[in-house]
């Protein structure tokens, strides 16, 4: 009887809490379609306008279904860190499973915890340090290939160049010399498969994969190439380790069970690392070169640091902490142009957040792009200013207003690897070239899987 009374009291308290909640503000939208036209035409402007008008939590509708936009740093912390178990990836990643299977960013709960625990040691600093020689050689080879274009005054699309470069880096870091003859085919297959995944995520309806329409046939052929390449490489790595990233993943063991990855798990994580490990870095570098071309004073200071620290040498892992200004440039680039500009979560139970009721099943959008540019937290937010990341300013700032790699337990596992690669590309590129935006080239946003430039990024090179 006491237990029944206690349960009854809890139910009353819960119902009272729900009754006392306040309405979530937000735009009314259009009849039937809600905010679909605004979402389709300019999603980032829509999110920015909603935040400016309604504040850090707002509700809007797509067709008849309500969604939440959350930008307030305290609310972001609640969802991504303090109460992350209630806010899962859920339906937001279903399309990604077409290509990535059960890769780490697509799973939740105990399965995620096991995979995270299993993979974490492979991304420790000492492990990353062992990959830097391979990374620097791959980067240098690609950058040296620009010499002829620079001599002839040709322009190049930095978005395309950085995509090719970072894909080559992650393939070499993952497989070392195992795929010398397969790099081109593997890169092309991944490009086709990831483009298909993005296209499919944007469709209201798409035919099942077995229907032999051209897009499905191209994707299925690309997936076949990926799987027929990756699975044998996993088998070979188990037999003959070479101290690359794949070996590091395969040698990891769960501390509690002693189990390692199955071949299928290894395949899913390899393909996921391909996607997350090159696309985000490529877009960050594209925007970084654009910003430097528009801010010669920052570029000059950056070149001076690189010259002083490296004196013309190829950077090593131990050099990178000394390149402190380059770290600030990277951080400020990711503030203005976060590659992962949007995170989605689904509430799995009813919650009350600061007096606002969030029902189970609610889909929530959190966007670093908006929070990073909010004048409430960032003075002159549209200005590119690496000094924002001086130790004093960082210490005085709410840490939850900056989350380019996410936040809390689901913080991107590869963030240190990405920042290492960015520092190396930046140093090696500026040692070789002066990089300038083609005059009059238009700048706009193309928010897809990552934050891309709408018109590419045509740039010219000058040999140094």
Image (tube, rainbow, N blue to C red):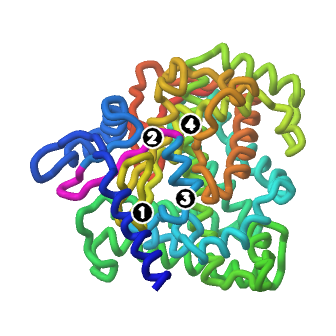
Q: CA distance from mark 1 to mark 2?
A: 16 Å
Q: Nearer the viewer, residue 18 or 194?
A: 18
Q: How far apart are the two marked residues, 4 and 2, measured between alpha carbons? A: 9 Å
Mark 1 surroundings within 10 Å by alpha-carbon count, few (fewer than 14), some (14 through 19), many (20 or more): many
Q: Left or right: 49 with respect to 179? A: left
Query: Which label sits on residue 71?
Result: 2
Indicate whether residue 67 is drawn in magenta: yes
Residue at which label 3 appears: 83
Give the number of the mark in front: 4 or 3. 3
Q: Earlier in the sequence, mark 4 or mark 1?
A: 1
Q: Residue at x 67, y 68 (%)?
A: 116
Q: Which mark is residue 401?
A: 4
**Which comes sooner in the sequence, label 3 or label 2?**
2
Please name which of the two marks, 3 or 2, marks the residue nearer to the observer.
3
Report how far apart the C-alphas of labels 4 and 1 lie in the structure: 22 Å
Q: Are marks 1 and 2 in contact (CB under 8 Å)?
A: no
Element class at badge 1 = strand
Could you say which disc has been placed on residue 347 in the image?
1
SS at mark 2 in the image: loop
Q: Which residues are magenta?
A: 61-73
Q: Crowdedness of circle 2 by 10 Å Cα count: few (<14), some, many (20+)?
A: many
Q: Earlier in the sequence, mark 1 or mark 3?
A: 3
């Amino acid at each position: 009887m006491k237990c029944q009374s206690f349960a009854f009291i809890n139910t009353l308290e819960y119902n009272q809490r729900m009754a006392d909640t306040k309405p979530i503000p937000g735009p009314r939208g259009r009849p039937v379609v809600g905010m679909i036209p605004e979402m389709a035409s300019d999603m980032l402007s829509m999110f920015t306008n909603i935040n400016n008008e309604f504040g850090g939590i707002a509700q809007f509708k797509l067709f008849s279904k309500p969604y939440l936009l959350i930008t307030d740093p305290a609310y972001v912390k609640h969802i991504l860190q303090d109460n992350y178990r209630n806010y899962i990836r859920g339906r937001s990643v279903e399309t990604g499973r077409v290509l990535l299977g059960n890769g780490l960013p697509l799973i939740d709960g105990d399965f995620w915890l096991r995979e995270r625990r299993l993979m974490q040691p492979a991304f420790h600093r000492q492990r990353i340090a062992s990959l830097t020689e391979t990374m620097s050689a791959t980067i240098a080879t690609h950058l040296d290939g620009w010499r002829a274009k620079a001599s002839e005054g040709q322009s190049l699309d930095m978005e395309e160049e950085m995509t090719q470069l970072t894909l080559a880096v992650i393939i070499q870091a993952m497989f070392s010399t195992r795929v010398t003859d397969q790099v081109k085919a593997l890169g092309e297959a991944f490009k086709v498969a990831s483009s298909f995944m993005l296209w499919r995520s944007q469709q209201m309806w798409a035919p099942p994969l077995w229907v032999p329409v051209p897009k499905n046939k191209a994707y299925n052929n690309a997936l076949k190439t990926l799987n027929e390449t990756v699975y044998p490489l996993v088998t070979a790595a188990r037999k003959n380790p070479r101290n690359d990233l794949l070996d590091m993943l395969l040698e990891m063991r769960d501390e509690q069970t002693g189990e390692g990855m199955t071949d299928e798990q290894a395949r899913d994580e390899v393909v996921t690392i391909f996607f997350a490990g090159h696309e985000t870095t490529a877009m960050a570098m594209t925007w970084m070169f654009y910003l430097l071309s528009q801010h010669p004073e920052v570029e000059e200071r950056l070149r001076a640091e690189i010259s002083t620290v490296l004196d013309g040498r190829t950077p090593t892992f131990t050099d990178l902490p000394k390149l402190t200004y380059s770290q600030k440039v990277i951080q400020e680039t990711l503030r203005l142009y976060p590659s992962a500009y949007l995170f989605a979560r689904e509430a799995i139970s009813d919650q009350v957040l600061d007096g606002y009721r969030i029902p189970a099943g609610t889909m929530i959008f959190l966007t670093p792009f908006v929070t990073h540019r909010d004048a409430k937290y960032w003075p002159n937010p549209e200005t590119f200013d690496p000094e924002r990341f001086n130790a004093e300013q960082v210490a005085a700032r709410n840490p939850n207003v900056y989350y380019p790699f996410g936040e809390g337990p689901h913080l991107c596992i590869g963030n240190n690897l990405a920042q290492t690669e960015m520092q190396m590309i930046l140093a090696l590129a500026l040692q070789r070239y002066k990089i300038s935006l083609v005059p009059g080239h238009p700048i706009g946003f193309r928010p897809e899987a990552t934050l891309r430039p709408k018109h590419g990024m045509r740039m010219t090179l000058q040999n140094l």
